[in-house]
């Protein structure tokens, strides 16, 4: 009831704010750009957190917990890797996520692509997002320095550290870098190898050449025993996914995160190409779910845990993915459009 009402308020405010934003962008002849609306949504949530706990503190119903390689998730709902603002992750966790994955971190500080790099999009009548953020972030040194001090650890739910890299050795070095900052702590965390980001050429090659994944996993396992999630792209053909499955099966404490955004040109997803900086980007949202389910089915032949990501936004998605073998469920676009889906889904689990 409370979640339903707050969800309505959030969606209505978001709708109005987005329309006003587009009106003024048109008025001042600026290109349409969704990013300010997302920032506004984040600011609203942050303000709410000052006003009071009733607006964002939701209890996770008991008995919904799942365990993966010793990590205890009080709910199977996860924030997929796309957000780095800890204040927002904190609020989503208090709304009832079982865990959250930080946005992919690269070796060097990056400002990402020029804007506009995020737009409302639509595929087969389903609303979603098209992004070409280009992995903006503070870089590994700053990230590793700050991460042990985050108040997110106080909530005591597993956190994922998503690692990207411009080469095989960079992936390994990046994991080792974070591990040296966290290994003495008693935090609950896992690594996620983003081998599927469509925005960086090198990031994509590991998924395209699974032998490289084998090398990276072996090199990481030489020094690090923390659980690892391997996040695969829905754009990879099934044969490659099966090869990746074989490699992950023979590695220790490795789970699969199936999957990520799908590569689309702006025209394919009803975005005006003139309002998007790149020729294509990562499409996300409910239209991805069919492919996510296919991937979950494919990976269910292996005996590692599966996180389903891509298009998940309601209890029906969760049930279908769970029946086919998924244990954890990652969400990104659904959290942007309405984070109150978290308590609503938790109540229906
Ligand atoms: C704005 C935005 C930024 C993203 N950044 C990352 C990222 O840094 N690393 C990553 O692995 N996936 C990233 N993703 C992909 C999401 O984690 C998720 O896999 C994808 O959006 C599909 O899930 P969804 O349909 O629930 O959004 C991003 C998605 C969006 C929309």
Image (cartoon, rainbow, N blue to C red):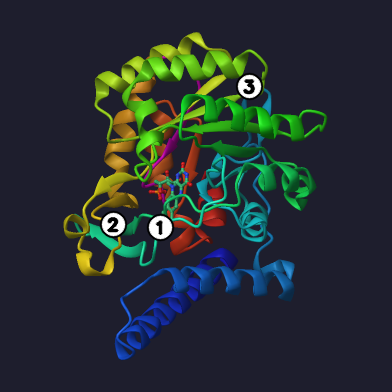
Q: Is residue 193 above or below residue 16?
A: above
What residue do we see at 68% from left, 23% from top? 70
Around disc 3, counting alpha carbons within 10 Å, would you say few (fewer than 14), some (14 to 19), or many (20 or more)? Answer: some
What residue do we see at 36% from left, 46% from top? 199
Give the image location of residue 231, x and y in percent.
Answer: 45, 32
Q: CA distance from mark 2 to mark 1?
A: 8 Å
In the picture, measured across the screen, residue 170 lies left or right of residue 16, that is right
What residue do we see at 36% from left, 81% from top? 19
Dot placed on the residue nearer the N-terminal end, 2 or 3: 3
Q: Which residue is mark 1?
A: 113
Q: The magenta stretch spans which residues?
A: 302-313
Asked which quadrant contains residue 241, the reply is top left
Query: Is residue 18 something that shows in the picture?
Result: yes
- C-beta proximity under 8 Å, tags 3 and 1: no
Secondary element at image label 1: loop
Secondary element at image label 3: loop
Q: CA distance from mark 3 to mark 1?
A: 36 Å
Dot placed on the residue nearer the N-terminal end, 3 or 1: 3
Asked which quadrant contains residue 254, the reply is top right
- C-beta proximity under 8 Å, tags 2 and 3: no
Residue 199 is a magenta residue: no
Q: Which residue is mark 2?
A: 278
């Amino acid at each position: 009831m409370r979640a339903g009402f707050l969800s309505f308020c959030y969606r209505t405010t978001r709708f109005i704010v987005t329309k006003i934003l587009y009106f003024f962008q048109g008025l001042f002849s600026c290109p349409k750009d969704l990013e300010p609306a997302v920032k506004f949504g984040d600011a609203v949530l942050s303000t709410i957190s000052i006003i009071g706990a009733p607006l964002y503190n939701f209890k996770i119903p008991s008995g919904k917990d799942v365990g993966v390689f010793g990590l205890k998730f009080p709910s199977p709902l996860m924030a997929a890797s796309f957000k780095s603002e800890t204040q927002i992750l904190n609020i989503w966790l208090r709304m009832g996520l079982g865990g959250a994955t930080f946005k992919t971190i690269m070796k060097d500080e990056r400002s990402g692509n020029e804007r506009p790099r995020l737009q409302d999009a639509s595929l087969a009548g389903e609303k979603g997002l098209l992004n070409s953020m280009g992995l903006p972030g503070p870089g590994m040194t700053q990230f590793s320095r700050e991460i042990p001090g985050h108040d997110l650890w106080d909530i005591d739910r597993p956190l994922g550290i998503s690692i990207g890299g411009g080469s095989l050795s960079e992936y390994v070095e990046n994991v080792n870098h974070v591990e040296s900052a966290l290994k003495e702590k008693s935090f609950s965390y896992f690594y996620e190898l983003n081998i599927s980001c469509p925005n960086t050429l090198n990031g994509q090659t590991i998924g395209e050449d699974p032998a490289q994944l084998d090398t990276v996993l072996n090199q990481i396992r030489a020094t690090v025993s923390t659980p690892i999630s391997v996040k695969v792209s829905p754009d990879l053909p099934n044969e490659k996914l099966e090869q990746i499955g074989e490699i992950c099966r023979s590695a220790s404490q490795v789970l699969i995160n199936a999957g990520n955004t799908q590569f689309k040109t702006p025209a394919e997803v009803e975005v005006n190409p003139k309002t998007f900086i790149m020729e294509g980007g990562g499409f996300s949202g409910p239209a991805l779910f069919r492919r996510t389910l296919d991937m979950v089915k494919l990976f269910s032949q292996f005996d590692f845990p599966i996180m389903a990501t891509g298009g998940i936004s309601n209890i029906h998605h969760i049930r279908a993915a769970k029946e086919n073998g998924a244990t954890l469920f990652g969400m990104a676009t659904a959290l942007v459009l309405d984070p109150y889906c978290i308590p609503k889904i938790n109540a229906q689990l």
